[in-house]
Amino acid sequence: MPARYHLRFQLHPTSAAPHQAAELAKFCLESGVEEVVLLLAAEEFHNGHPTDAEQDLLYDATAVAADVLRDAGLGVSLNPWVTTGHADRGRHDRHGFALMSGPDGGSATGQASFACPRWRSWITAHYARFAGLGFRVLWLEDDFRYHNHAPLTWGGGFEPLMLDRLALLVGEAVTREQVVAAVTAPGTPHPWRALLQHVWHTAQLEVAALVAEAVTRHSDGRSRLGLMSSDPGAHSVEGRDWPALFEALTIGGEVSQRPHFAPYSDAPGRTLSRSVWLLEMQRALRPAHVRTEPEIENWPHTTWSKSDTQTWSEMVTAQLSGADALFLNLLPSPSGHAQRHPRVAELLKRSRPALDHVADHHRSEWPTLGVGLPVAPDGAAHVRTARAGDLADLAPDPGAAADFLLRHGIPVTAEQAPVNVLFGQAARSFDDAHLRRLLSGGLLIDGVAAHVLTERGFGALLGVTVTEITGRDEPSAPGPYSVERLLPAVPVAGHDDGSEIHLSVNLQPALARLRPVADAEVWSTVLTADLRTWGAGRCVFSNAIGGRVAVLAATAPELLPCDDDGQRLLHATVRHLEGEAPDLPLVSGGPHLIPRLARTEHGRHLAIANGSADPARPRISFPTAPATAGATLLAPLAAPSLATLTAAADSPTPSPPSMAPTTLTLDQDLPHRGWLLVRTADGVQR
């Protein structure tokens, strides 16, 4: 089936609405757009939550525009844009709502509290009225959240009505200052953190249920709800229970998600790693029945904010994730005239062949494969802070580990896998039984995770003990750390000529002091600038429960400078952790070649994006030769083309040939932000 374009359009509530809609319909039909998402009273046309008179104008214009668009054969959805309110930006409440307050005591002027009864009645009535027009989906904007409500620091949720709810659970009156200090206090999480998250999530669920019931009733069951979501780490701070929230929003067995995944404006190609991961992580958080329509962001809403090349690459990324539709922000929001922007139409038409190819050859139900980054939705409940006062410190960020792996050519999955990674505070997110399962397979951990696991009694399974975490600016003997030197026996390609290999740790904010046990293998040592030994840098160990563990002294691996030697070392580490049954294809051949791997009915599907501005010729290292391989090259804004790969056995005398490590190399350049799609039939069913 072809890719589906859903185009968001700012409707002006004037007498020109029918003309706007007719012009838009012509634009959509010429550009291959299937559905229009009407955007109401957004940004430049937003004066706060609409008054009754303003809502009447919006309703009349929307009703006319929806009829025109449907008569043209287009689907129509609605995006009221505002729920609690995105940001004040000089706007003031005109309804008597109880407003959000931030952790520092600042109060919003136009953004409502989830606990406000007056706002709950207003938002329910607002959605109910428009639901009567029979839209396919009515979207809840991403301000349906507590964080990111400018100008509040971090966000809201500390207003008196919310604190009153918390007080009922605590059993006594609480102040904002007490609550902030408690939930962000260093050390073992204070019980109030979990209680505040419960209060926040319960209030949000109540509103979701009210809106869903109103939309069901007033649309006679014709309409569904959709939820735009933000970064899952910030939602974890809020205590979001994803299955419960989607259940509350479900109407007639259906609900949609608009996952955030892409930068809002031009960004380096390597940011595709974060996009690949955000889509993968949200896939793991989303119940199977939820439709997904990833949003291709563009902000400010002009055609100059993001290049067509970047927009194309993000659309392909979303389609590879199994998107049901692409939610497009492409037309300048204030314009109101689609035909004034033929470049957008050209972008959509030129993008269509590649997107249709992906849609035809990729299935949303295919499971992802790679190094596992298990996701704990409640991770923020377990984070331990180094300071008090900042709620942002509670947000878990597996995206940093994903960037580290993906940009080095290592595919990842949000599911538990034969080889997994635990970096930083993620080591606090799982119970002892789960950690023991991870430690019985292949596990890569950084210095912070090693310190946490040592504290939790797993030191004997790591092969090292962590005596301390030493900050960059702290006095340390024999001096400040500088470089990491690989030891001669490390099984890294190109390391058999006797030359020394040094990698920088100069920018690490802290390093863990690793004390290896006798049976551990030390792969590198950390040196000072004058080449004195500071400590162990990387160690590997086979533990008593059958696991293989690799420990990095680095506490922020994502800040380690990327280079060819570092990539070879990381690839060798993954191969070591895979043990006797290596399985993953690993990608090299250029900087920031970002893979996405999926299991198909007959083999595997490997997609590789070039996140560098330079063309590259990817090399794919397979532990065993794939039975067959076919490849397609997707160059930005071009039709798909067949690609050829040259195979070379890594072993000169394989026996049998199918068991030999094999490298496939692309015979042509993969351009900036282009995608290479490789299909293999390896005969292995998992």
Image (cartoon, rainbow, N blue to C red):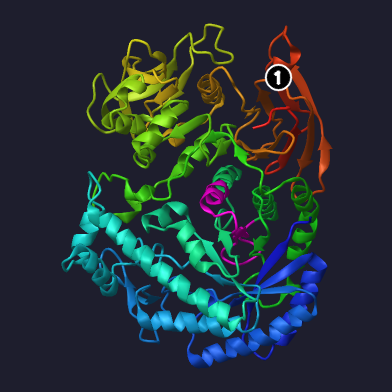
The residue that appears at 78% across and 35% down in the rendered structure is: 631
Label 1: which residue? 662
The residue that appears at 59% across and 22% down in the rendered structure is: 582
In the figure, is residue 232 to the left or right of 477?
Answer: right
Does residue 551 lie above or below 372 as drawn? above
Q: Was residue 297 drawn as part of the magenta stretch in this picture?
A: yes
Viewer can see residue 47 = no
Q: Amino acid at mark 1?
A: Thr
Looking at the rendered image, the quarter that the C terminus falls into is top right
Asked which quadrant contains residue 571, the reply is top right
Q: Was residue 250 drawn as part of the magenta stretch in this picture?
A: no
Q: Position of residue 616 (x, y in %)?
A: 69, 33
Asked which quadrant contains residue 37, the reply is bottom right
Q: Nearer the viewer, residue 317 or 220?
A: 220
Does residue 350 lie above or below 383 as drawn? below
Q: Residues within 10 Å of mark 1 (few under 14, many from 20)?
A: many
The residue that appears at 40% across and 54% down in the rendered structure is: 236
Q: Position of residue 134 (x, y in %)?
A: 65, 80
Q: Nearer the viewer, residue 125 or 101?
A: 125
Q: Nearer the viewer, residue 684 or 77?
A: 684
Q: Position of residue 230 (x, y in %)?
A: 49, 58
Viewer can see residue 436 = yes
Magenta extent: 278-306
In the figure, is residue 632 to the left or right of 192?
Answer: right
Q: Position of residue 472 (x, y in %)?
A: 30, 32
In the figure, is residue 551 to the left or right of 567?
Answer: left
